[in-house]
Each structure stands twice: as structure tokens, then as C-alpha cells.
Image: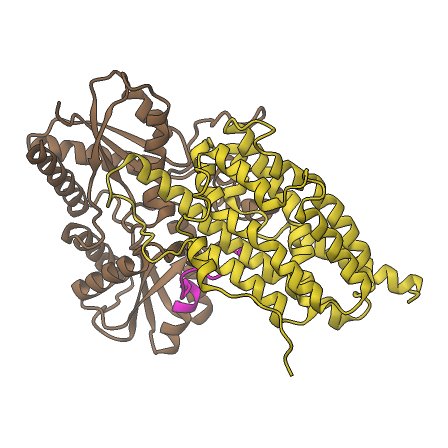
Amino acid sequence: MTLTVEQEKEARRFLSDLRQEIKNHAGVGHSILGRMKTDPRSRFDFKVLAGQHFPLVGNFCAYMELLLINAPDSEAKCWLAKVLVDEYGERSDGEDHAEHYKKFMHAAGIKPGEEDTIPLHPEVVNFIREHYRVATEEPFLVGLGALGPGHEWSIPAMFELAVAGLRKAGFTEEEIGYWTLHLEQDQDHGAWLEEALVKYCLVPANRELIRKGALLSLDARERFWWGITDKVTSESTKKNLPPGVSATSSEGQLTLRELRAKWHVEARLKE
Amino acid sequence: MTVDHLLVTAFGGPTQECCGKHAECPGQAFCFVNGIFGDNPARRARVDEVVEHYKFFGGFSRFNEITEAQATAVKSELKKRGHELEVSVGYDHWLPHISDKVVELADGSKEFVVLVMAPHQSSISWDAYLRRVSEGLDQLDESTRPKWAGVVEPFWNKSGFIDALAERIRTAAKSIGADLTNSATGLVLSAHAVPMPVVKTSKYVEQIRETAELVASKVGATNWMVGYQSAPSDSKIEWTTPYLDRVIEELKEGGAQKIVAAPIGFLCDNVEVLYDLGVEGKEKADELGVEFAAAEAVNTHPAFIMQLADNVEAKLKELALAS
């Protein structure tokens, strides 16, 4: 399809506005991230954060794969496939991102084998559930908005702040490789994405679907960061105090292992 | 070893003191609010919006001054009861920081209890202040670390707190000639809004509800509602509702001609109470043509101070028995 100059200009204007909206979203600007630079941060904080963040890392490929199946054309499939190849580990010495993340978890103090045994805040579970829903039940462009701009344009801004906190907590560059890798890779993914998105942004209805997806993802992200704040604060309180003093309870919270046993993700023919 | 120190912990508010975080001072109110949201360009507009609320009152808050008066009054009451405790006050978001106050106790002989100045419990208030105590302890080695003996029980449903709130409400009602027992007077019982992900793990909402029921019953109010205030305008997710402005509308729609609003979720007249409830609440009521009075927070109300002293004393007795 050949675009007119005006069509391309309008599409790029929308994408530029969307980038700005994402950058200023309260999910990207959550105080737990902003305070990485200003507050003291310890390895223990990141041990708690890692246990909650790992399930997102471990499920991202599955949302992308489900979206890939529903992609309407080869260009969209190519973008999704390129991102997936990175996620599978092509630029991570053969380790997929979840495996790479485990190295960080171990450096933060989580024992090998215990990565999926940590009770998860309900908003961690909701984040994953929402992205499976968007990738499978919403129109393709909503899914693309969520996993494209909603992730690739927000992660570099969020991770830049997280990396500041990680360095302050004393992690080495090797230990935080997962985070710094994403600063670089997601810049690339974001740029590829912008090119792939232009052709879908020619009509207002499509633009709305993409924006809707991005905002659904970021709203889930804002809830997720509040869940992390809740966990990090309460776990560090419990660390030095007898049971019962914290205001919070993790009663009924499921682990990733329990979720995996309970959930069944499938793509199948529906007539 | 026995408890010899009471550490009072609270949120904090900007004073004339310089936080020292910036080479060139952008103003204490900015430093304070920016410290809450963190150094993040994405939230700059919200930071600027809140800073304006502080500027409305000259750029500072009486939060710390009132909290220190509360602490002094509790110390004095405990002394009358035979408990000679050193008392210090530390803040989550302003000087002196809670963790620094813990470090100051590092001569190896101190044993302290913590009083959390938050009437209702959630991770972002109650646990957040206690986390700062932990941070202070983590800065010390075993030999100098003071002993953290315990945390004073919360007081959301305790009679002294309820009595103090009730008296503040009666005073406010009197100022506009409102009869709280008449349904033509609406009573708004206000607390800080909390994001729903945080509510899921704590009893914050239930505790607010219990305080509200006890206070409403105490003053004989028949037409009352809980209203949540001060949720950030740029957040895209659900916070505890109904919001204060909607509650004022609902009370008016239900026939209220006068509205009394009381900050049951706050312990002092900080800027959120004075601005979000006092100024914005009144603006909303004026817009609807309803007479409005905001009650003072409990501040240093004698019944509240007695309650705090009761709770500290109960903790001291419990610890003495345990030892």
C-alpha cells in the first residue's frame, strides 16, 4: 500500500501524541519508580520486586505468540516475530528473557528453584490475566496497542529509573544485565514498531483501537506498580518485626507455580 | 533492659528547614511533594498542581509543628502516669527522617517502641513508616543497634479518638447552626483516598467505615457518608470512592441544606485537610448553594492525647509482662 504524504503525516502525528501520552501516564510515572532515584534502595527491596515481576517476564512471549496467530498480515507478523526472536534469546547468548531474569533474581537473594513459589500480589495476577484477555479477546489492533506501544514505549522510561535504583542498591552491571539489555532492545523494538504501526493508523477507528490497547496495558501497569509498592513496603516491614504488626496480609495469594497448574492457555479453531 | 524511648512516626510536611537535596533550593513545598512522587518527569504536572496547594498557605505546612505538639503532650501525660520516656519524632517525607531518628538512638542501650501516627492501616502509611524504622536499624551494626521492642496498637475505633472527632464535629456544626440529628444536615466523614490495589491487602476501608459509624453514632447524625479525598488527578486507576465532591453532591441531592465535613482519616490540620477539604470542599458546597463547615482535625484534643497515652501505656505493660 502506498501512503500519501498527508496520510503518513497524520499517522505519525498520532503516534507521536501517543508516545507522549504513554510517557506521561501514571503507570510509567509511578512513585515507586520515581523514588528509585531519591530514596534508599536495598537488595531486599529488589528481591521482593523480582519475585513479583518475574511472572510478567515469563508470560510476555505467550501473549505475543497468541497475538501473532491473529495478526492480519505479514508486516505485523514480521514485527511480532522480530520481537519474539529477541525474547527467545537471540541477543541474550541463547538464554530466553525469563532465564536471563532468573540470574537477576538469584543476585537479589531468591534461591534457584524458588522463583515460582512466591505469593503474588493480586495485581500481578491481574496484569497477566488482562494481557491474555487483550491478546485473545480484543481486536488485533487493541492487542497490538497493548503489547506494542503499551510495552515497548513505556519500558525504557520505567527501566531507566529502575536501573538507577538497582545501581544504588549495589548490584553489579552483570547482575542487572536483564534490565540494561531492555533499555537497548526496547529502543530498537520501539523504532521497528513505529514503522510497522504507520499503515494501521490511517483511519481514526484504527487509531482509537491502538490507543485503547496501549492504555489498557498502562492502566494494568499502574495497578501492578501499586501492587509492587504494597509488597515491597509490607515485606520490608515484616522483615524486622514480629508477625501481626504489618497492616497487610498475603492470605489467599497464589504463586506462579499454582497459577500455571490452574491456567490453561490455548489457541484453537472456533467455528 | 526496659523501654526508655518512644519514637513517634508520621508522614511529615514541609517546614522552613532545607532538605539539602538540590544545589539551588526550588522551595520546600516542591522538594516535599517531589519527594513523594519521586524524581520523574512523567509526574511533574501533578507535583506542580500539589505545590500550588502548599503555596496557598504560604508554601509550608503545620504538620510537623502539630505532630510535635501531640508528641510533647503524650510525653507529658505518660510522665503523669509514671512513665518517664524520651520522645522523638521522625517523618517519612520530611526532616527529621524516621531512619535518622533511629540512628540517633545508637548508643547501644536504648529500647524503643514506635507510635504510628496514622489512624487507619495500609501499606502506604502504617507499613511505610515502619519500613523507615527498619531502614534506620539496617544502617547500624549489631553492637549499637537499639532494641525495637514493639509497635503501639492502632486506635481507629478507640473511644478517645472517637470522642475527639465528635467534639470537633459538634463545634463545626455549631458554627453554621447545623443540627446533626436532623437529616437536613449532611455529615461528610473524610479520609485519604487509597488506590484499590493497596486496599486489597489491608483493612483500611473497613477501619474507616468503623470509625465513621462510631463517630456518626456519637454525634447522633442521621444523614452521613464517608468521602475519600486527595486522589491524584492524573491517576488512571480506581481509588477508594466515593470522592468528596460526589458525596457533597449526593448529600445535597438527598435534601441536605447544611454540610459539616470532618477529616476522620487525618490527625492534624495538614494542607490536604485545609485545602482539599476546607477550600475545595467549600467551593463545591458553595457551587451547590449549601452551607458548609469543615471541622478541625483532632490535633492536640485532650481526649485524643489521652487515648494515645493509653495505647502507649498498654504496650509498655504488655512488654513488661512479657519480659
Q: Quadrant of residue B255?
A: bottom left
Colour chain B is painted in? brown
Q: Give the mark count.
A: 0
The N terminus of chain A appears in which quarter of the rendering? bottom right
**Residue pictured at 61% horizontal, 45% vertical:** A97
x and y, in percent, of residue A5 in the image: 93, 61
Q: Name the residue nearer the viewer: B147 or A50.
A: A50
Residue A214 higher or lower than B39, as above or below: below
> In screen coordinates, is B219 left or right of A110?
left
**Quadrant of the image containing the C terminus of chain A:** bottom right
Q: Where is residue B281? Give x, y as percent.
A: 41, 60
Q: Please say whether residue B242 is one of the residues in the magenta stretch.
A: yes
What secondary structure characterizes most of the magenta part?
Answer: loop
Image coordinates of residue A20 in percent, x first then y, are: 70, 52
Image coordinates for residue B124, horizontal then vertical, percent: 38, 46
Residue displayed at 80% across by 71% down: A203
Tell me what hue chain A is rendered in: yellow
Front residue of this view, candidates B260 and B103:
B103
Q: Does A182 appear in magenta?
A: no
- Looking at the image, residue B67 lies above or below residue B255: above
Return the residue nearer the eye: A104 or B56.
A104
Res A216 quadrant in image: bottom right
Q: Which residues are magenta?
A: B233-247
Q: Is residue A96 above or below residue A168?
A: below
Is residue B271 visible in the rendered image? The answer is: no
Q: Residue at x 46, y 51 (%)?
A: A226
What's the coloring here?
by chain
> Residue drawn at (60%, 29%), measured in percent from left and top?
A174
Is residue B220 visible in the rendered image? The answer is: yes
Q: Residue furthest bottom?
A: A271
